[in-house]
Image: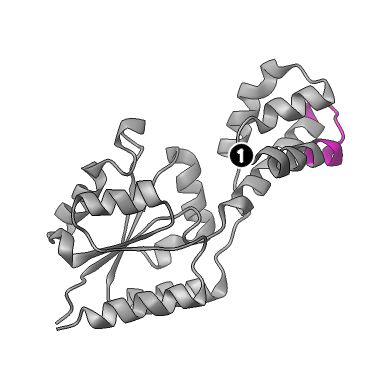
Amino acid sequence: MRMTKVIIFDLDNTLYNEKEYVISGFKAVALFLAREKSLDYCTVYSSLLESFVINGRGNNFNYMCSKLNINNRIISRLVDVYREHCPEIILREDIELFLLELSREYNLCLLTNGWLLPQKMKVESLKLDRYFDTIFYSQQDGLDFAKPHPKYFMQVLQFYKIEASEALMIGDDPVADIQGAKKLNMPYFQVSNELDDNEKQQIIQFLHDNIQ
């Protein structure tokens, strides 16, 4: 008898590298400015990438506007373009196969933080409905309920009518994913950034060890 009945996955930097989404968004913003403001696409895109390399995520549009002498009042529009764009992201083939294998034996649930529309568009681009029977967006009721808040962890348990011990949380974030699971005494597995072969083998071993 399997003790684990539901496997809960995080999305960003667990199933795919979120850097790919950022780059996709930068391309959308560069294309928007090229069309709307007659700016050079490559120049805009390069400045956004430069900001990302130097500072990581955050204030990338401010950096680009300052460098290219663009009025920063446009930033709110750029944020909308970024969040509303159709992302050019894909799952690695080995992760697709891993999810397919798990879905044959377990209920798979996706539990993700992030703005609702962008997260839904990521799910659609990655075609995750092929593997997950339920998808929960923890920020749809506001930032206060994002992981590690227990609200959506509890909703998952209630939906499947299981105890916390019968679920397995898989995610990369030590606070949102891991602390969230710990608060409920839920088994968890932390990945580094996008599932690798060793981590997949460890997860399979954990699931095997939890068969009575």
The quadrant holding residue 33 is top right
Q: Residue at x 69, y 29 (%)?
A: 61
Q: What residue type is labelled 1?
A: Arg
Q: Is residue 72 visible?
A: yes
Residue under pointer 1: 57
Q: In the rendered view, does 172 fall on the left or right side of 27?
A: left
- Decide: few, some or many residues near mark 1? Use Cα within 10 Å; few <14, some 14-19, many ≥20: few
Q: Can residue 142 be seen in this view?
A: no
Segment colored magenta: 35-45
The quadrant holding residue 90 is bottom right
Q: Could you tell me which quadrant the N terminus lies in?
A: bottom left
The rendered magenta stretch, by its main secondary structure, is classed as helix
Q: In the rendered view, does 101 fall on the left or right side of 122?
A: left
Whether residue 36 appears in magenta in the rendering, the answer is yes
The foreground one among 27 and 125 is: 27
Q: Could you tell me which quadrant the C terminus lies in?
A: bottom left
